[in-house]
Amino acid sequence: MKNQAVRYIFVILIWAAALLLWIIKGWWFIAAALFLLHFFETMFTGIRTGKEHGLSRGYSIIMSMAFGIVWWKPLNDEYKEKNIPEDCEE
């Protein structure tokens, strides 16, 4: 959990830096690229991952748009670990 909090803080700092660069330097394309990346992550992976974990669609969209892979990857890894058949374990 501690590592996850650090990852969330890191992503918040990336968003803040992108928005500051937009405001100060006029570099809107960095924030736009980050938004588009998270948008496509949300559409192709975030919503499905939330559904697999019994989370609401709205919560999945918010978390995926805000944190992207930092949010859904640990959930997918946890899901896969719990659903490995016993005969496949080493």
Image (cartoon, helix red, strand yellow):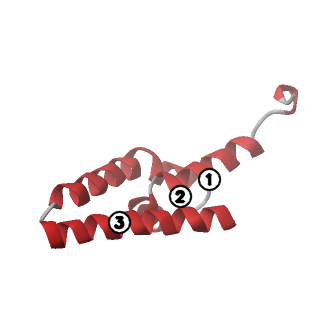
Residue at 29%, 57% in the rendered image: 35
Q: Which residue is mark 1?
A: 75
Foreground tag (2 vs 3): 3
Tell me, yes or no, whether the two marked residues, 3 and 1, touch with CB atoms within 8 Å.
no
Q: How many marks?
A: 3
Which residue of the protein is positioned furthest toward the left in this rendering?
26
Check the picture and name the quadrant holding the N terminus: bottom right
Q: CA distance from mark 2 to mark 1?
A: 7 Å
Nearest to N terminus: mark 3 or mark 1: 3
Q: Amino acid at mark 3?
A: Trp
Check the picture and name the quadrant holding the C terminus: top right
From the top left corner, tell me how far across and down residue 50 is, in percent.
54, 56
Tell me, yes or no, whether the two marked residues, 2 and 1, touch with CB atoms within 8 Å.
yes
Q: Amino acid at mark 1?
A: Leu
Q: Amino acid at mark 2?
A: Trp
Do we see residue 34 in this rendering?
A: yes
Q: Which residue is mark 3?
A: 15
Nearest to N terminus: mark 2 or mark 3: 3
From the top left corner, tell me how far across and down residue 34 is, in percent.
30, 55
Q: Which residue is mark 2?
A: 71
Query: Dot 2 lies on which element?
Result: helix
Q: CA distance from mark 3 to mark 1?
A: 22 Å
From the top left corner, tell me how far across and down residue 42 is, in percent.
40, 52
